Image (tube, grey):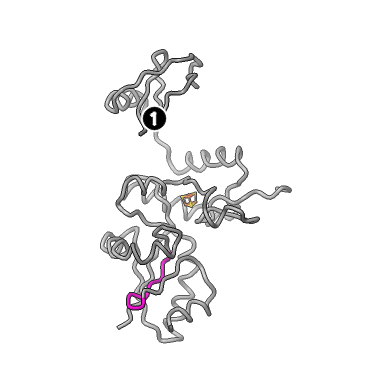
Amino acid sequence: MNRLIMFHGRECPHCKKMMPLVDKMIEEEEVELEKLEVWHNEKNADAMRSYRDIITPKCGGQLRVPSFLNTETKDVFCGEVEYEELVDWAKR
Amino acid sequence: MKKYWRCHVCNDIHFGTKSPKICPTCLQGNAYVEVSSCEALNVMSVTESHVDKDAFAKAIQVFAAAGEFQINPDQERVALLLEGMFNNENNHGLKYCPCRMIEKDFEKDLTLVCPCNFLTHDSYKDKENGECWCGLFKKRRHHE
Ligand code: SF4
């Protein structure tokens, strides 16, 4: 089954900007998505690092936050996008 | 490989592949001798220095004033980023970029210490309104 994850950092402005859009999508589109904070939770940081080979090629060779990952299809993007693009990613 | 060098006149410490031709502190020429990391650390420990959030905020102002970029005028954004960096320093040892994640590969992770080399970032380079990946530093426009 598809598992959607948002890796985010508590003090990251891009994440702060995306968070209300993510919450809106979860509510309005009935999308299931896990939000994992990585700078204050080592388990979540390790989880993000375990997807290094999938995330970094799509994110300028780095682990950037926010990173949005579909664990099944390996569909990844990072940074800020418009709401429509976010929903489009979650539903494809 | 980078090595440690000590000025034999004023004990200035340099960490780099080559020794400086002239000591930037006492201006003596041909002044440096290669030393061990242990000696370098011992010499440097004479001066204790704490750079807290306010001091760091001033330090990056000075840094930006000499560059082609400025600190983002959005103070809330800057405060959030400083908070993140200092939390990262407390929890993870260095002021790592709050908008990225360390990989536990120390040499690679050193490229994430703020200020990083953002002049090469895809969000900065060749962009008219370029900014570092977090938006802490913004390219200064000519009229600014
Ligand atoms: S992207 Fe900006 S905030 Fe992040 S480390 Fe580099 S200079 Fe600092």
Q: Does residue A39 belong to the magenta stretch?
A: no
- A32 vs A60, left or right, is left
Instruction: Give the answer, above or below, for where A78 lies relative to B91.
Output: below
Position in image of residue A64 (x %, y %): 42, 60
Image quarter of the N terminus of chain A = bottom left
Position in image of residue A26 (x %, y %): 42, 81
* Residue closer to the observer: A60 or A24: A60
Please tell me in which quadrant of the rendered image residue A39 appears.
Answer: bottom left
- B123 vs B109, left or right, is right
Chain ID at mark 1: B
Please tell me in which quadrant of the rendered image residue A8 appears.
Answer: bottom left
Q: Does residue A71 belong to the magenta stretch?
A: yes
Mark 1 CB lies closer than 8 A to ligand 1: no
- B90 vs B20, left or right, is left
Please tell me in which quadrant of the rendered image residue B103 appears.
Answer: bottom left
The part of the chain drawn in magenta is A66-73
**Which residue is painted at 41% across and 86% down in the image?**
A30
**Which residue is painted at 43% across and 84% down in the image?**
A91
Q: Residues within 10 Å of mark 1 (few under 14, many from 20)?
A: some
Residue most toward the right?
Answer: B143
Position in image of residue B82 (x %, y %): 46, 50
Circle 1 residue = B15
- B71 vs B26, left or right, is right
Image quarter of the C terminus of chain A = bottom left
> What amino acid type is highlighted by mark number 1?
Phe
**Which residue is painted at 47% across and 41% down in the image?**
B56
Instruction: Give the answer, above or below, for where A53 lies relative to B91.
Output: below
* Residue closer to the observer: B105 or A33: B105
Secondary structure at badge 1 equals: strand
